Image (tube, rainbow, N blue to C red):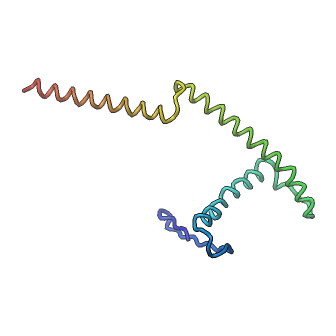
Amino acid sequence: MARKVKAKEIKYFVSNAPPRTALMALMKVVFTRAGVEHVLRLAKSEIGLDHFEGRSWLGLLRHMTLCQPAMLLLAEQTARALNTLGRAWQQRRGGRSGIEQVASVAQYHLARNQAAKDSRLRDVHKRK
């Protein structure tokens, strides 16, 4: 059973796994379905998996065999483009990683807030 608190939804699952199967193993299997469905949706919309109009199982397997390398090529090109964009974005930030960037921004704001606090304290002491 899985519960979505915000959506007020409860999902139940049935399995034929052995009774001693670990719960985490079952949950991993259950929630990989969304990834598989996403890949099939991409294959249907991007590379023509849904264009098969044959009547034989062998024909469907041949069509799927042709679609798989196309899907692999699409995935590799997407990964290459994302890596290129990631490198360009990192160079624009001065070559620092995301954690280093966040840490430097946080450190800047802490120092700025401390300087403002010190300035206010000096103003209060000058008035007295």
The vertical placement of 12 against 94, above or below, is below
Q: Quadrant of residue 50?
A: bottom right
Specify whether 14 is left or right of 96. Answer: right
Residue drawn at x 42%, y 30% is 104
Q: Tell which of 48 and 38 is nearer to you.
A: 38
x and y percentages locating residue 93 in the rendered image: 52, 27
x and y percentages locating residue 29 in the rendered image: 65, 63
Q: Tell which of 42 and 81 is nearer to you.
A: 81
The vertical placement of 2 against 111, above or below, is below
Instruction: Count up the numbered dots.
Output: 0
Residue drawn at x 58%, y 30% is 89
Specify whether 111 is left or right of 100. Answer: left
x and y percentages locating residue 90 in the rendered image: 56, 29
Q: Quadrant of the N terminus?
A: bottom right
The vertical placement of 31 against 105, above or below, is below
Specify whether 100 is left or right of 121. Answer: right
Residue at the outermost left position: 128
Q: Quadrant of residue 107?
A: top left
